[in-house]
Image (cartoon, helix red, strand yellow):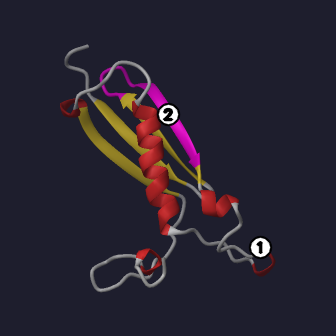
């Protein structure tokens, strides 16, 4: 379809991020992908005995990049103008301490 438009839906959960591409005209799922956070999977930043569960900002960034790329790969190649929008949903929130430029401290040179 030459005039097709697609939306990307991104859902951030506790241990993974999921992305889906939907055809706007048909209302059908074109493709989807899931990425499990590598740092979460390794048990980093978590201490279940203390009921402490945290995610690292890179898990969110890497998950977004990987799932959108994976979901966009199947089927015919799409052009940028066919993208109608993107929607992002989360099951909760993870407070992130940032510097004065808005960069998460976990991503600064001092921490990396």
Could you tell me how far apart the alpha carbons at marks 1 and 2 are, in whole angstroms? 30 Å
Can you identify the residue that label 2 sits on? 32
Q: Is residue 105 magenta?
A: no
The location of residue 89, given as percent across then percent down, is: 45, 53
Q: Is 96 drawn above or below residue 71 in the view shown? A: below
Query: Residue 38 — which label?
Result: none
The location of residue 8, given as percent across then percent down, is: 37, 39
The location of residue 93, given as percent across then percent down, is: 50, 68
Viewer-proximal residue among 29 and 82: 82
Magenta span: 23-35
On the picture, is 48 further left or further right than 95? right
Q: Badge 2: how crowded within 10 Å, few (<14), some, or many (20+)? A: many
- At mark 1, the secondary structure is helix
Which label's residue is closer to the chain start, 1 or 2?
2
- At mark 2, the secondary structure is strand
Quadrant containing the N terminus in the rendered view: top left
Q: Is residue 33 magenta?
A: yes
Q: Is 71 drawn above or below residue 15 in the view shown? A: above
Identify which residue is drawn at 43% across, 74% down.
107
Can you identify the residue that label 1 sits on? 48
Identify which residue is drawn at 66% across, 72% down.
53
């Amino acid at each position: 379809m030459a005039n097709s438009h697609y939306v990307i839906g991104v859902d951030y959960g506790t241990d993974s991020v999921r992305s889906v591409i939907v055809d706007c005209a048909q209302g059908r799922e074109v493709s989807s992908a899931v990425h499990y956070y590598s740092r979460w999977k390794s048990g980093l930043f978590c201490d279940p005995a203390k009921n402490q569960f945290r995610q690292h900002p890179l898990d969110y960034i890497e998950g977004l990049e990987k799932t959108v790329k994976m979901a966009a790969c199947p089927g015919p190649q799409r052009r940028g103008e066919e993208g109608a929008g993107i929607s992002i949903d989360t099951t909760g929130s993870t407070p992130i301490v940032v510097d004065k430029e808005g960069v998460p401290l976990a991503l600064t040179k001092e921490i990396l």
